[in-house]
Amino acid sequence: MKKTLIGFLFLINSSAFSQTEKVIGTNDGLEISYKYQKIEENEKKDKYMVYVSAVNKNNYPLYYGVKTARGTNGTVTIDALAQNSAAKIVVRNSVGFLASDEVKVTGDQTNLFANNQQTALFMYEAGRNYNYEHSFNVKHGDSLIITLTYNYPMKRIENFDVDVTNAALEGMYRTSCGGATFSLALQTDIASNRTFLIQTVNGRQIKWFKSSNFTFVRDFDSFTTITYDKISGIFYYSNMDGTNCEWIKNR
C-alpha cells in the first residue's frame, strides 16, 4: 500500500510541474517554441521557469540586422536604443517590482556589417537549437499568459548589402590545396595610396595588391589572383596554370 501511494504522488507532481513544448511562431523558417515549469508556490504568487527554444529549419543560415552607433574614437557598436534580439517571448501577467517580463531570443553576433557599418548582422545557423530561459512570478493560481513578438525579419545573407571590413579580411587562413596555414593583414602604402594584403607563410611575406573591390593580384605575378567572396568569407585563388584553391578563414 505504501509503495502504491508514493507512486501516485509522483505522478501528480510530474503532471503539475511540467508542460509539453509548444511552437508559438515561425519567421521565415526560424521556429520558436516554449515550455514552462512551476518551481515555487505560496499563497500570494507562483514562480515559473520558462524555457524557450529557437531553431532555424532552413538548410542555410538566417540573418537579421541591428542598428549601430559610431563612437567618438571611430569604433562601431550596437546602438544602445536598439533591440539586439530577433524576437521576444513575453509573460503578460508577470508580477514583481522591476521584474523582467520577457525572454529575449537572440542570435549569434557575427563580424559582418552592412550599409557602410550602419547595421550589425546577427545569425542563426541552419539546424542548430538555440536555448534560453528565465523565471517569472505570477499571482497564485494564475496561468501564464505568453505572447511572441518579432523585432526583425529574418533574411538570407544575399539580401543584405554586406560591407567588407578589415576585420573580415584579416586573420588566420588555411588553403584547400595542401592544408597550409598562413595569416593575412590589410595595409595601405601611404606614398602610392595602394591597398594590399600581406600574406605571411612560415615567416615569408607575399604582397597582394588590390585591383578591384574584392580582387587582389600577387606582386610581380599579374596572372595569380585571389578574389574575396563577401557572402561566404572565402578567398578564391587561381593562377595561369589552372590551379584553383579556397582560402578558408579559421573561426
Image (tube, helix red, strand yellow):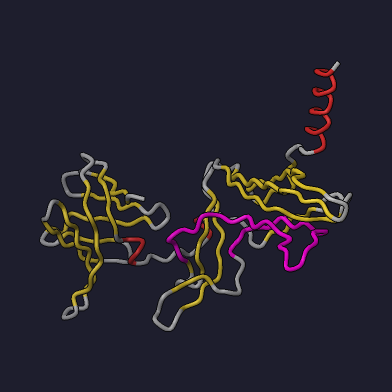
Residue 150, compared with residue 1, is above or below; it is below
* In the foreground, 23 or 195: 23
* In the foreground, 235 or 125: 125
Residue 183, compared with residue 3, is above or below; it is below
x, y (%) of residue 61? Answer: 52, 48
* Res 12 quadrant in image: top right
* In the foreground, 26 or 157: 26
Highlighted range, magenta:
84-113
Is 225 left or right of 22, judged from the image as shown? left
* Res 211 quadrant in image: bottom left
Is 229 left or right of 211, judged from the image as shown? right
Could you tell me which residue is drawn at 42 percent across and 55 percent down?
231
Could you tell me which residue is drawn at 83 percent across and 54 percent down?
45
Point out the image quarter for the N terminus: top right
Q: Residue furthest front?
A: 2
Q: Is residue 38 magenta?
A: no
Q: Is residue 108 magenta?
A: yes
Could you tell me which residue is drawn at 76 percent across and 67 percent down?
97
* In the foreground, 69 or 197: 69
x, y (%) of residue 47? Answer: 77, 51
Could you tell me which residue is drawn at 63 percent across and 47 percent down?
54
